[in-house]
Amino acid sequence: MECANRSCIGNMRSEINYCLGNKLLVVSLTNLADLQTGKRGEGDKIWLETKKKGK
């Protein structure tokens, strides 16, 4: 998923968590504004936030 800012990342994560409940998933989110300024995630990846959720 691509997000325009950190607020978008939080909103998307909340919506995904709500919809999927306790199902197991891994969500990778990108903040386009950060990418445009050269900020990248661990290992120079575009995914700025990766979360594991569920049981």
Image (cartoon, grey):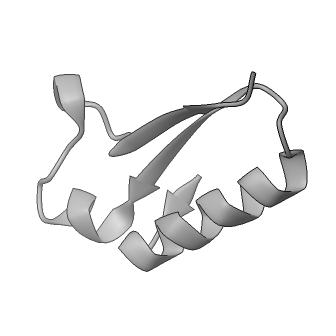
Whether 39 is drawn above or below 8: the answer is: above
Quadrant for residue 4, please give it: bottom left
User: Considering depth in this image, is 15 or 30 the residue closer to the camera?
Assistant: 15
If the image is split into quadrants, where does the C terminus sit? Answer: top right
Identified at 71% across, 29% down, the residue is 25
Toward the left, the furthest residue is 38
Q: Is residue 41 left or right of residue 20?
A: left
Residue 19 visible? The answer is yes
Q: Is residue 11 left or right of residue 29?
A: right
Quadrant for residue 48, please give it: top left
Q: Position of residue 29 (x, y in %)?
A: 49, 49
Identified at 14% across, 52% down, the residue is 39
Q: Give the total of numbered labels.
A: 0
Whether 38 is drawn above or below 26: the answer is: below
Quadrant for residue 40, please give it: top left
Identified at 52% across, 58% down, the residue is 2
Q: Position of residue 12 (x, y in %)?
A: 63, 64
Residue 5 visible? The answer is no
Q: Position of residue 37 (x, y in %)?
A: 13, 65
User: Considering depth in this image, is 44 or 18 the residue closer to the camera?
Assistant: 18
Q: Position of residue 1 (x, y in %)?
A: 59, 52
User: Considering depth in this image, is 13 or 29 the residue closer to the camera?
Assistant: 13
Identified at 23% across, 63% down, the residue is 34
Whether 55 is drawn above or below 12: the answer is: above
